[in-house]
Amino acid sequence: MKRRPVCLVCLFLMLCLYVTDLVGISMINGNPLPVSVQKYISEHPKFTVSGEVQECQAAEYSLSVYLKQVCLTVGSEQIPIENIKVYLNKEEQIRIGMFLRVCGKLEEIPGPRNPGEFDSKQYYACRKIYYQMKDGEVCDKSIGYSYFGQLLQEIRQKAETILDEAAGAYAGIFQAMILGERGNLDAETKMQYQMAGIMHILAISGLHISFVGMGFFRLLKKAGTGNGVAGAVSAFLIYAYGVVTGGSVSAMRAVGMFLVLIGAGIAGRSYDLLSAMALSAIVLLLDAPAYLYNVSFLLSFGAVIGIGALTPEICSLLNLKKRTAKSLAGSVIVWLITLPIALHAYGEVSLAGVILNLLVLPTSGIVLASGIFALPVGIFVIEIAKRVVFPGKCVLFFYEKLCEVVGWIPHSTWIAGSPQLWQCAVYYVMLGVAFTGVKWGKKAASVALVIFAVVFLGYHSRNGLTITCLDIGQGDCCVLKMPGGENFLIDGGSSNKKNTAVYQILPYLKNQGIAILDGIFVSHTDQDHISGIEELLELCAQKLTTVRVKNLILPDWDTTGGEYEKLKMLAEQTGIRVQTVREGNLLKAKEAQIEILAPENGADGSDTNEDGMVMKVHFGKFRGLFTGDIGAETEKKLLDSMEDVDFLKVAHHGSKYSTCQGFLDVVSPEIAVISCSAKNTYGHPSADTIKKLEDCGAQVEYTMKNGAITVRTDGEGIWLDRFID
């Protein structure tokens, strides 16, 4: 480090940012605007803002416009509020560099509402965007615009069109790899690549920048230009390429390092990879300190450290000569370095990716080259562009088959859960000790320590019973982590959120290290209770998730409808056992049991709410009651089988037609959780229901206010956690 002062400066900057955020001085992970401005925005229905157009993205029904240097108009005063994202009518003619004045309702970018859920707030904070405006209306726009910025935008759009026509079904992958445009990638491909551990090839990174940048540099050199001219032109083109591809953190890291490489060559100085990486990190962090917590930032720089610093050293210590051995060592080292980051963010990591990358990385250049060369050809003759891109399509077909094979291999993805920060710190200490052991010739002991460190990182103690009510919008979803190690899902659906399995349920399960669901209980078949379950079963059937389901548990109805039969069919296709239950059934787990209180014998399912499943969880002295969407009629029928409970999942999202007074007098819950959306057309939760719950002494919790609600018990005491305080 003595010879690398830039690395020391980078480490010092990161430490300062972390400490200042820890003590609350900086606002890396939050909204940096003055509290008075935030309060004013939240209290007013509509605003006029003005700013310069930085980027435009056309969607199916709207136009997403990113404005920079935005000012909020309050009377005659202009208040700066950084950057914002505005959704406009798709027909608006907007150009890069235009100054817009738009009117609409400003909303703060929402953060995650459940453990493991994607953090949009942190993602946009890296772009210094803290607010968005939906249904914006353009009040005024300038005639002038940025000719260079608009030219880059049009080049990108033209390139997208060429790849779309030339690459056919693989166009989305080509667009992601060459242009950084992931919007056209289908969900199945994303999930396949993630499970296979090759998702990184879809990000603009060092491979792309070095291929394009050095390609231009060598071409200019052959044309007779000197180092200075070739370097300057290449640097300009690479910076433009970084902007065209969206300026992702991995792209700008690679652009920064390439500029240092070119600068060193022009100045006649030697190039140091770690110093170049540190300088790129400093520039990114000074511009947007929120990158300190950004997963892409950490993974990108972690991979460079693994490849550039550790791999050559370890290969030398192990005396690895063959290219295959060096590649395998590099793949393993990068996997080990980035493991805590990946697990902390996603809760899972591909085991197959270590091997697959030996096949994918050497061949990804074919995809990149064929796609890039097809672009200029496609401007003139699209039929020839189709032939140029054909080798890349063959390689992508090969990747597709590799992903399918991985999907059929059990445990190809390790769902270890999200480790604590102290676990990550101890893990890296153990890796450091193992590295020192290799230097001292203790290879066997070092390998054993690395294996122990990996296992340690995935260790999670389980004490007692945990009930988590996920915030899934207008719907219900509860996860039970039983004291004996079993895991159950009770309902999982929403009427106002799509893809709840992909965006809420699966991320939570992975975050908690839940790879197997011993059972999914379906209280009844309304969409706001089963939409996510249907999605999950479909993903299991398509081998697009390594989460496995053992049993699907349905209410025992004499008459079943289409949704009921669809669930059974999906389960049977996947090899999941289907069971039906009714009152009197008892499901025994290792240290707890689940008692079924409804439906009653002979229930026909004609009223899905009243004939829904009701269940009670017993663990020590703890009692938890799950009531689905039953109404007062069923509650009265159950009074004889009821007792005082500690936890109540309030029926029907707090509807006024459920949770009658007589029922509450008997169950008298200590904690009552209402699951619903803040904005719904049903009037949930009812003020009358809330008052009755409070009057009976219950502590009422709401997913719409605090996100996921978690209740823990050791069979005696009870502890409650809110995901959002």
Image: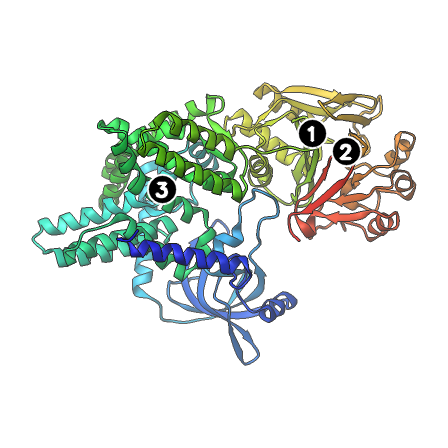
Q: Which residue in the rendered view is the most extreme toward the bottom?
A: 76
Cα separation, mark 3 vs mark 1, equals 38 Å
Above or below: residue 210 compared with residue 535 = below
Q: Residues within 10 Å of mark 1 (few under 14, many from 20)?
A: many
Q: Residues within 10 Å of mark 3 (few under 14, many from 20)?
A: some
Coordinates of residue 684 in the picture (x, y in percent): 76, 49
**Discs 3, 2 touching: Cβ within 8 Å:** no
Coordinates of residue 453 in the picture (x, y in percent): 46, 33
For residue 626, what is the image quadrant? top right
Q: Residue 566 bears which disc, if any?
A: none
Q: Which residue does the image show at 32% across and 45% down from the upper left?
A: 205
**Discs 1, 2 touching: Cβ within 8 Å:** yes
Q: Which residue does the image show at 37% across and 40% down from the upper left?
A: 202
Coordinates of residue 338 in the picture (x, y in percent): 41, 39
Cα separation, mark 1 vs mark 2, equals 10 Å
Q: Disc 3 marks which amino acid? A: Ala
Q: Residue 715 bears which disc, if any?
A: 2
Q: Disc 2 marks which amino acid? A: Gly
Coordinates of residue 578 in the picture (x, y in percent): 67, 20
Q: Residue 483 bears which disc, if any?
A: 1
Assign a secondary structure to mark 2.
Answer: loop
Q: Dot 3 corresponds to which residue?
A: 303
Assign a secondary structure to mark 1.
Answer: loop
Q: Mark 1 vs mark 2: which is more N-terminal?
A: 1
Question: Which one is in front, 261 or 478?
Answer: 261
Residue 558 in sight in this render: no
Above or below: residue 268 compared with residue 474 = below
Question: Which one is in front, 270 or 638?
Answer: 270
Q: Residues within 10 Å of mark 2 (few under 14, many from 20)?
A: some
Q: Which residue does the image show at 58% across and 60% down from the upper left?
A: 107
For residue 377, what is the image quadrant? top left
